[in-house]
Image: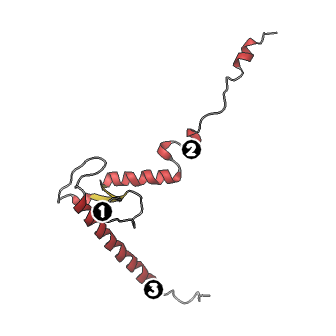
Amino acid sequence: MADKNKPMDTSRLDRVVAEARREADKRMAGYREQSLRIHPWICGRCGREFTRQNLHELTVHHKDHNHDNNPPDGSNWENLCLYCHDNEHQRYVDQVRGYGGGTSSAQSAPATHNPFENLKDLLSKKDP
């Protein structure tokens, strides 16, 4: 059990986090550069075109949302502008949460109750 009065040694944690960030940066630079070489500098959703001056606004989106799936042929990547990329990720989050296009699964299920099922019987009854 750790001594509560002794300060926690965070140097190991700091090293692990720093290494993870370096690896992520290296991975990001690698597939981004590849995607920019392979694919045109056009947003795959809205069609906005990019130049060297605004290329920093073009992102690389992983179609399967797995950032470790980086085939060299670029088949899991598409270039999206910042806005379309954010929208795509929000749509994915909504899908995972079960929001599916603004309707819940309960709303999309067919109705089984028919309030007019016995209407004919009710109308055929004579008033007393």
Secondary structure under tag 2 reads: helix
Mark on residue 105?
A: 2
Residue indicated by mark 3 = 12
Q: Earlier in the sequence, mark 1 or mark 2?
A: 1
Gap in angstroms between the C-alphas marked 3 and 1: 37 Å
Which residue does the image show at 25% across and 57% down from the upper left?
39
**Residue denoted by label 1:** 73
Give whichever of discs 3 and 1 has the lower sequence position.
3
Amino acid type of the residue tagged 3 in the rendering: Arg
Few, some or many residues within 10 Å of mark 3 (<14, 14–19, 20+): few
| Residue 21 screen position, x and y as percent | 37, 75
Tag 2: residue type? Ser
In the picture, measured across the screen, residue 34 lies left or right of residue 63, that is left
Residue 86 x, y percent position in the rendering: 37, 54
Horizontally, residue 19 falls left or right of residue 47, namely right
Question: Number of marks in the image?
Answer: 3
Q: Residues within 10 Å of mark 1 (few under 14, many from 20)?
A: few
Front of the two marks 3 and 1? 1
The answer to whether the residue labelled 1 contacts the one labelled 2, judged by CB atoms less than 8 Å apart, is no
Determine whether label 3 and label 1 are within 8 Å by CB: no
Category of crowding for the residue at label 2, using alpha-carbon neighbours closer than 10 angstroms: few (below 14), some (14–19), many (at least 20): few
Q: Quadrant of residue 118?
A: top right
Query: Of tags 3 and 2, which is closer to the observer?
Result: 2
The residue positioned 30% from the left and 62% from the top of the image is 73
| Disc with the residue nearer the chain's start (3 vs 2) | 3
Q: Nearer the viewer, mark 1 or mark 2?
A: 1
Q: CA distance from mark 1 to mark 2?
A: 37 Å
